[in-house]
Image (spheres, coloured by chain):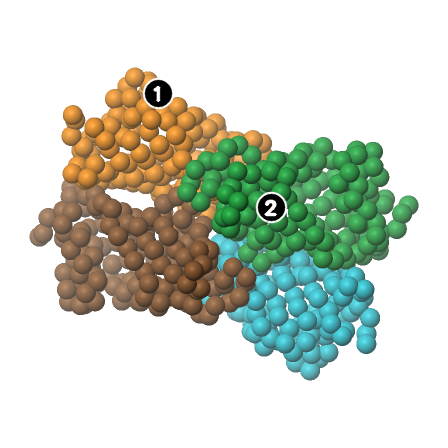
Chain colours: A cyan, B brown, C orange, D green
Amino acid sequence: MPELTVVRVREAFDALATGDREKILEYWHEDVRFEIPGNHAQSGWHEGIDAFLGFLGVVAKVSGGSYRAENITITVNPDDGYSVDVNTNWARRAGAPEDGDSPYDVLDVTAMHLLRWQDGRIAEGRGVILGDGVSTSALWWAPIDATGFRRGTQ
Amino acid sequence: MPELTVVRVREAFDALATGDREKILEYWHEDVRFEIPGNHAQSGWHEGIDAFLGFLGVVAKVSGGSYRAENITITVNPDDGYSVDVNTNWARRAGAPEDGDSPYDVLDVTAMHLLRWQDGRIAEGRGVILGDGVSTSALWWAPIDATGFRRGTQ
Amino acid sequence: MPELTVVRVREAFDALATGDREKILEYWHEDVRFEIPGNHAQSGWHEGIDAFLGFLGVVAKVSGGSYRAENITITVNPDDGYSVDVNTNWARRAGAPEDGDSPYDVLDVTAMHLLRWQDGRIAEGRGVILGDGVSTSALWWAPIDATGFRRGTQ
Amino acid sequence: MPELTVVRVREAFDALATGDREKILEYWHEDVRFEIPGNHAQSGWHEGIDAFLGFLGVVAKVSGGSYRAENITITVNPDDGYSVDVNTNWARRAGAPEDGDSPYDVLDVTAMHLLRWQDGRIAEGRGVILGDGVSTSALWWAPIDATGFRRGTQ
């Protein structure tokens, strides 16, 4: 069984980015649960790798492919089987004006994932946003823009 | 053109409750806009009588038919063409435990509608919730229960 | 006893603006209760005319005197003893950059007051904000700016 | 310089609990910055060990001494100088009914601290709450109870 290290956490996210299901399942359990924080349309526990990948697809679509994440650090506890990765996240809502900086249009937060590892793979993940990012990201995820116009289904 | 009175406002909501489209259009413009407050899945401007009736259908479904409203008062300004009706609202989320009182499960607020009248019919409505009811109703509308479990599409 | 009319509601707010306590008490009960919506530092029921005037002083201070309100309409129900006045509100937080438009710095909402009249004077008032203004005004009232810096006590 | 280990993180919090300033400064920089998440009265960056200890005093007071934390795990990255500790938090607001379970009265969340270490001591900390805990803890921190009654200054 591979050891839980900073490198292995990084590899797990790299695998996710490939979209290669077989590769992904080397690092993520098929019945992984992943929690998105807050109470917006995508919040709560997504059950199973397909639901989780589906969520990532929604992010890509809602952000018009603009979503970017940059890693700050990764911490681990191999004995307990936990890791935490810290990242900056940036995204513009699809259809939002290119020059606007309203929180309804632009997501600009620092966030973390708490991952629980079992038998060398991720069994559970919980996303979380720092500072007042839960408030501002609620506006980004909202079905409305700053004027109350409903910008279409998420 | 019928005068804007307390009685006429009451009749407009009575017409809505019948579900009879022709009757409804005696009081509501076909292209009426109606705003639901907050930033949950149903928030923002619903454009046109069909979108508005669709929203009422969602409320009925999400509340499992438990939604109740009771009028407190109706205020009018016939010269400006505005009315405000004040109501208590109560509803249990469909599927929520019968004895729970978590705000994720039970909606219990006082709310108002600001209506703008044009040519004897309602052209625009804006819902609004008193006190901290926007916070608690956000939990009721959330796709999750108090444990983060996703309770299904709204 | 003076009748409850649109003019009398307007006079009640004009009296408030004078700051003349005797004049104010012609329109507002000494033990008036006034509710500020949301859950920020000034939210909830302010009990008595002095607490209410104290709140208005806080608004003036926190906005560095920039707070502006413009009336849209006033609706009344003399039989029930209720009025509702609808207003646009605008204010910049004291100390906020002059050219910023973040909701942490600029309040720009439409709001209403539901007033209950008793014996010709206001016995109870409840403020309420339209659209998603409760969310954005929570940021304006927050003890922090958009970077999390604590901008001093309110 | 002491190494950054799970044990050292635990010792840092044990030192904090003693209230012994000299002991605390063995683990925490005197000019440590600590961020409380959300936008309630205590949110944002508390600058310096005294401001941080002052915040802990406010928690003790507002919870009437009922605040309890239990550690789940601690993760570290000694190379980058970061640790994350995960804890359950529970507290009843001082003055709240003993049998109530409203989120205005009872805080019941899982939370994390992201700590940045420098020269063997904590230079920066950022608190964060999992799931929808930012929403429910906003109600716990609110100056109001579930009825809008202002429960006194924090």
Q: Quadrant of residue C90?
A: top left
Q: Is residue D11 left or right of residue A96?
A: right
On the image, the x and y values in percent for residue C10 come to 24, 30
Residue type at mark 2 is: Ala
Q: Which residue, as the protein is rendered here, is positioned at the far front?
A: D99
Do pointers 2 and 1 mark residues of a single chain?
no
Q: Is residue A121 visible?
A: yes
On the question of residue D28 being in view, the answer is: no
Q: CA distance from mark 2 to mark 1?
A: 42 Å
Who is closer to the viewer here, D107 or B150?
A: D107
Q: Are marks 2 and 1 in contact (CB under 8 Å)?
A: no
Quarter placement of the C terminus of chain D? top right
Query: A98 above or below C127?
Result: below
**Residue C143 appears in which quarter of the rendering?**
top right
Drawn side of residue C100 relative to residue C112, left or right: right
Which is nearer the eye, D62 or A73? D62
Q: Can you tell which mark lies on residue D24?
A: none
Residue beneath the point at 27% across and 30% down: C122
Q: Which residue is mark 2?
A: D91
Q: Nearer the viewer, residue D111 or A73?
A: D111
Q: Position of residue B17 (x, y in %)?
A: 21, 62
Q: Nearer the viewer, residue D17 or D55?
A: D17
B30 sits to left or right of B66: left
D53 shown above or below B148: above
Residue occupied by mark 1: C19
Q: Chain of mark 2?
A: D
Q: How far across and how far down the image is residue B57, in percent? A: 31, 67
Q: Residue furthest right?
A: D1
Residue at the far left in the pictured view: B1
Percent x, y for residue C68? 38, 33
For image coordinates 52% across by 38% down, the residue present is D95
Mark 1: which secondary structure? loop
